[in-house]
Image: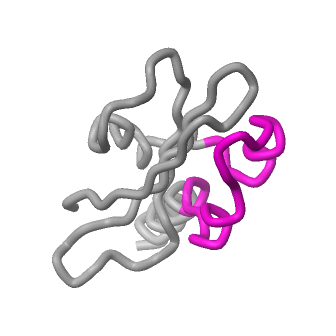
Amino acid sequence: MAAAFVGLAMLVDEARKDLIEPSVYNSVKAGDAEAEVRDKLPDGDSFFTEGLDDKGSGKPTGAECLSLMSTEDMDDQGRDHVFRFCFKDGKLIEKRSYWIVT
């Protein structure tokens, strides 16, 4: 029983590593320095973020993108909110918000 609780706690901690507040998404804009934007974001290094980039619209050519889950609860239709940040040449060149079916 204790092992199951520990496992569940670890899973929840893993999920929280890649969640961001909508206010963080709203606080950055295209043209902002990549380093400044990334300082506000988790690293996105979690199995919860795997494949999120592929579920949104096409990425800008040559950009490196980071997709993170929103802290907002999923909506009543079984969808989760995703925020994607795309960088190129040291700048945020695009940010997108989209929903995925869970």
**Looking at the rendering, which quadrant does residue 73 occupy?**
bottom left
Per the image, is 35 magenta?
A: yes
Comparing 80 with 16, the one in front is 80
* Quadrant housing the N terminus: bottom left
**Who's the residue at 32% across and 32% down the image?**
58
Q: Residue at x 32, y 75 (%)?
A: 74
Q: Which residue, as the protein is rendered here, is positioned at the far bottom?
A: 76
Location of residue 51 with respect to 101 vertically, above or below = above
Q: Nearer the viewer, residue 59 or 67?
A: 59
- The percent coordinates of residue 20 (x first, y second) are 59, 63
Is 54 part of what is drawn in magenta? no
Judge from the rendering whether residue 29 lies leftward or rightward of residue 95; answer left or right. right
Q: Is residue 3 left or right of residue 51?
A: right
Name the quarter where the C terminus is drawn.
bottom left
Above or below 2: residue 69: above
Q: Position of residue 21 (x, y in %)?
A: 60, 70
Q: How is the image coloured?
A: one colour
Q: Which residue is drawn at the image coordinates 26% and 57% (left, top)?
A: 100
Residue 51, position as x, y percentages in the image? 33, 37
Instruction: Give the x, y percent position of residue 37.
Output: 75, 46
The outermost residue toward the front is 31
* Number of numbered markers: 0
Q: Is residue 100 left or right of residue 62?
A: left
Q: Which residues are magenta?
A: 16-43
Query: Image quarter for residue 98?
Result: bottom left
